[in-house]
Image: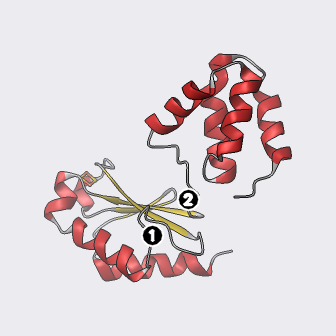
Amino acid sequence: MYFDFDKLESILQAHGSAPESLISVLEDVQDQFRFLPEEALVLIGTRIGVPVSQVYSVATFYNAFSLVPKGRHLVSVCLGTACHVKGAGEILGHLRKQMRTDSSGTTEDLEFTVEDVRCLGCCSIAPVVKVDDEVYGYTSPQKALEVLEKYKKKT
Ligand code: FES
């Protein structure tokens, strides 16, 4: 998949060439491209002096990183205990089915990635769905879908 090498170059220059900057560089690349392109991992390793195998290890260890493109909006459905007992599993299944996500939870138009997470820290308003930085409580399969409709209209 195409990505902008100039943007990657800017990120690398901003962090310098110390091997310790690996995670910070990966975080910025993930933010910028919404995934870690394979070519970028090779270039990052070369530029900051970290073996590519180690770059891959870090990139695949943390859930915050993805080797496949994620959607423009990240939808986190909490499956922690409080949310689970209030039907969060049905919300997750409903969203993925209605939005026809692929096996990684991403819609074909790359607008949304629907993923499950553990406790978001607001159990009193369970079940909880978070879209980007916005938290929605007392949701249901239908309410969650309506919330996402609002995001479809945003540019
Ligand atoms: S279990 Fe969902 S917010 Fe705590």
Q: Is residue 119 visible?
A: yes
The relative height of residue 118 versus residue 125 in the rendered view (above or below) is: above
Task: Give me the C-alpha separation between circle 1 and circle 2.
Answer: 11 Å
How many C-alpha atoms fall within 10 Å of the one at disc 1: few (<14), some, or many (≥20)?
A: few
Corner quadrant of residue 100: bottom left
The relative height of residue 109 versus residue 16 in the rendered view (above or below) is: below
Q: Name the foreground residue: 121 vs 59.
A: 59
Q: How is the image coloured?
A: secondary structure
Q: Quadrant of the C terminus?
A: bottom right
Query: Could you say whether the residue bearing mark 2 is in a helix, strand or loop?
Result: loop
Q: Position of residue 16 (x, y in %)?
A: 78, 22
Query: Could you say whether the residue bearing mark 1 is in a helix, strand or loop?
Result: loop
Q: Is residue 139 visible?
A: no
Instruction: Give the residue number, with chain letter if any, for mark 1.
Output: 102
In the displayed structure, does residue 4 sit left or right of residue 130? right
Taking the view exactly as shown, the residue that stands out farthest to the left is: 85
Q: Name the foreground residue: 103 vs 20.
A: 103
The amino acid on which the numbered mark 1 sits, given as a three-letter code, is Asp
